[in-house]
Amino acid sequence: MKTNVGTVDRSLRIAAGLILIGLSLSGTIGLWGWIGVVPLATGLFRFCPAYSLLGINSCKHS
């Protein structure tokens, strides 16, 4: 897996994922909030399969 998620993109993905999971755990948004696992994982691994398919790379150095 080649890194294709940059620093700002990574931070936003991790924050969004944690917020969605937190809201789901608190019962505010229900079970669909667990979709936050996807942006959280792509942020932590710095790899997004969709970016790979679309030829997008938000890293400065890759």
Image: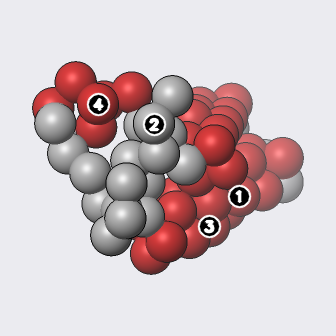
Q: In the image, 62: left or right of 33?
A: left
Mark 4 or mark 3: which comes first in sequence? 3
Residue identified by numbered label 3: 15
Which label is found at residue 2? 2
Residue identified by numbered label 4: 52
Mark 4 or mark 1: which comes first in sequence? 1
- Location of residue 55 (image quadrant): top left
Residue identified by numbered label 1: 18
Distance Cα–Cα, label 1 vs label 2:
24 Å
Q: Is label 3 in contact with label 2 (beta carbons under 8 Å)?
A: no
Q: Secondary structure at mark 2?
A: loop
Please rate how many residues cluster around mark 2, counting C-alpha atoms within 10 Å: few if below 14, some from 14 to 19, many from 20.
Answer: few
Distance Cα–Cα, label 3 vs label 2:
22 Å
Distance Cα–Cα, label 4 vs label 1:
23 Å
User: Mark 4 against mark 1, which lies toward the viewer?
Assistant: 4
Q: Is label 1 in contact with label 3 (beta carbons under 8 Å)?
A: yes
Q: Residue at x 39, y 47 (%)?
A: 4
What type is the residue that disc 4 sits on? Answer: Ser
Q: Is label 4 in contact with label 2 (beta carbons under 8 Å)?
A: yes
- In this view of the protein, can residue 28 be seen by the observer? no
Q: Taking 18 as reference, is 42 above or below it?
A: above
Mark 3 or mark 2: which comes first in sequence? 2
Mark 1 or mark 2: which comes first in sequence? 2
Q: Secondary structure at mark 3?
A: helix
